[in-house]
Image: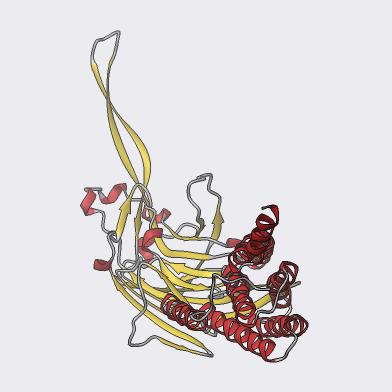
Amino acid sequence: METSENQNQSNFFQSNTAKMIMVGLLTLVLLIPLELVKDLIIERSQRQNEVITEINDKWGENVFFYGPILKVPYTSYEETISINEKTKETVKQKKASTNYAYFFPEELKANTNVTTKVLNRNNYESVVFSSKMKFEGDYNLPDFSSKNIKNENIQWDKATVLIKTTNLKSIKDEVKIKFRNTNFTFEPVYSDTTKDSTEALETGYIDLRKILVLGKTNFNFDITYNGSQQIKMVPIGKTTQVSMKSNWAAPSFTGNFLPDDKTKQITNSGFVANWKILHINRAFSQQSFDNLPDLSQYAFGVDFVIPVNQYQQNERASKYGFLVIGLTFLIFFLIQSISKIRIHIFQYSMIGLALILFYTLLISITEHSSFRNAYIISGIAVVILIALYSVSILKNRKFPVFIALSLSALYTFLYVIIQLENYALIVGSIGLFAILSAVMYFSRKIDWNTSNS
């Protein structure tokens, strides 16, 4: 009786069912080192972001710009009524205060030339740029009639021109605006408003009655920035036309307005983009009284970033690690079941660790080369390692060749999926369907009720 039970127990552990359970459990155990590899990729990616932030902080940060804006002070009076306690008479008093009105240009044209380059530190890189921005346009004499403000209350001789921007520390030249034949120099303005993320440049006093007295008056000014990652501006002109040219071949147009498709050109050597925005295209008027509104929601521009960086590609590759391990074990298990060759669980473990080693090789080589080169080198190394190990396990060369070809096809298939964006799901689904069909075909004649001896 005991002999029969021991024999049944022995038969069970030698059965395909028991081996499937052990291989399945091993696959789950190997998820632990696979997760550690994923954590390593995330850690390296975070380190890259820290280095990029440090590089950008020293070179120059994002550029956000809108201007020029006429800032005109005016005097308003508030009438107060009080009662004299001695005489019991009603006393009316007028209290004067200075407020500001803001006026945007009638026409604004911006011509921007952006030269990008990649800065490297150790194994990390960041995209930075130098931009030369040329502005021109015209103003009309400000109209206060909508607020019933009398002309004598307008302080025409104390008007200024204002520019709202970020990244002041990376402006490379002095900024001057020219009205007719007169230049006015911008100076930084200290602001204690913590809610406003922009900084301000403002000119000294301008007597608008002398500058704008003849109707439309032209202006022009230049700004040169060192910056990184992004340029955005607000279309504050009644008609705003912007032209941007750059050597960056992978622009990402962002914000509230896209460039004109008819004139937009993107090539391997760079891009050219043009915008034309009318005042009816955005929900703010050409003038504002008492305070300047937050117009950042109407901004548009270009992102200068690497579309898919090496760490994103490594992270996407590692997400398929469970699939690679599972399919590779399945191939060995089918070979074992068809050929009656015994493969020890330790040998499965060695194969699984070799598959995980692929991802550590991939991330380390990528940091010193491109993702494509790293993928090819890591894939070849792991395929050769497993194929040579299979020769000693399977005792022939036919099955190891099949394993090497299968792994090569699997890694190639996954590389194609990683590179695709819009079609990754459909290609992956079709590929997995083909793999499942192949497994079903090759396993159709296996007798799962018998045990290997």
What is the x, y in percent for residue 374? 69, 81
Left-right relation of 452 to 200: right
Judged from this view, the residue extending furthest toward the front is: 1
Q: Position of residue 3 (x, y in %)?
A: 70, 56
The image quadrant that residue 320 belongs to is bottom right
Measuring from the top left, give residue 403's x and y in whole percent.
65, 85
In the displayed structure, does residue 143 sit left or right of residue 352?
left
Q: Is residue 181 left or right of residue 62?
A: left
Residue 309 x/y as whole percent: 59, 74
Residue nearest the observer in this picture, 100 or 13:
13
The residue closer to the viewer here, 198 or 392, is 392
Above or below, 148 relative to 131: above
Q: How many marks?
A: 0
Q: Quadrant of residue 308?
A: bottom right
- Seen from the viewer's position, the closer of residues 280 and 97 is 280
Which residue extends farthest right?
Answer: 392
Q: Describe residue 417's horizontal placement relative to residue 315 as left or right.
A: left
Q: How is the image coloured?
A: secondary structure
**Is 373 rendered above or below residue 59?**
below
